[in-house]
């Protein structure tokens, strides 16, 4: 990436471009077009959500080596049924180290009639909601419910994380 390109550039390309007929001018326009495409592809985020570790193409700061950004990864997990006032665990399968960090943890509980975001805090009855967290010591996803209101719900959980 050239030094005059903004690191905060939006990953969008022109949808049309007029190319000159003069070969000398065309070379310059084609070169710029290729650079624009390469730069935008390189800063775009992967929209792939799988039940295996995927490179998100997102880069995060690195205090130890600012010139070397840290890569984040994404993985999707599913749970067929939420617990009846208890804790459901799903092994992440992620090899965490002392430098690993979670950058995004989110999910949805869904029944035949309702979809609701999993919350990052415990909500007690009567207005309960499924609570989502990752236990780094056990490397398990934990979904906690405080009532039996959620037994007909399944869940999809997405973890995004940096391994180093």
Image (cartoon, rainbow, N blue to C red):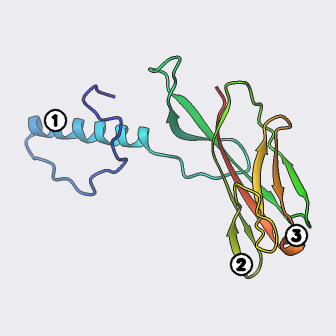
Q: For residue 110, which quarter of the picture?
A: bottom right
Query: Which residue lies at the image location 59% right of the left edge and 51% below the top edge?
Result: 48
Q: Residue furthest left?
A: 22
Q: Earlier in the sequence, mark 3 or mark 2?
A: 2
Q: Earlier in the sequence, mark 2 or mark 1?
A: 1
- Residue 47 image offset from top left, x and y in percent: 55, 52
Tell which tag, 2 or 1, sits nearer the viewer. 2
Q: Which residue is mark 1?
A: 28
- In the image, residue 7 above or below residue 3: below
Residue 7 position within the rendered picture, expressed as x and y whole percent measured from the top left: 35, 35
Whether residues under marks 2 and 1 lie with C-beta atoms below 8 angstroms apart, the answer is no
Q: Quadrant of the C terminus?
A: top right
Residue at label 3?
147
Residue 46 left/right relative to 146 = left
Residue 114 marker: 2
Q: CA distance from mark 2 to mark 1?
A: 55 Å
Q: SS of the residue at dot 3?
A: loop
């Amino acid at each position: 990436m050239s030094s005059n390109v903004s690191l905060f550039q939006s990953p969008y390309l022109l949808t049309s471009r007029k190319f000159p007929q003069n070969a000398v001018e065309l070379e310059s326009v084609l070169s710029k077009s290729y650079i624009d495409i390469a730069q935008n592809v390189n800063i775009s985020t992967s929209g792939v959500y799988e039940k295996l570790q995927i490179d998100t193409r997102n880069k995060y700061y690195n205090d130890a080596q600012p010139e070397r950004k840290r890569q984040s990864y994404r993985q999707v997990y599913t749970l067929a049924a939420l617990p009846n006032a208890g804790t459901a665990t799903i092994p992440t399968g992620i090899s965490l180290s002392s430098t690993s960090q979670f950058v995004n943890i989110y999910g949805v509980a869904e029944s035949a009639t309702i979809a609701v975001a999993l919350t990052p805090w415990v909500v007690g009855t009567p207005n309960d909601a499924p609570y989502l967290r990752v236990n780094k010591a056990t490397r398990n996803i934990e979904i906690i419910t405080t009532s039996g209101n959620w037994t007909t719900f399944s869940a999809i959980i997405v973890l995004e994380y940096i391994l180093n």
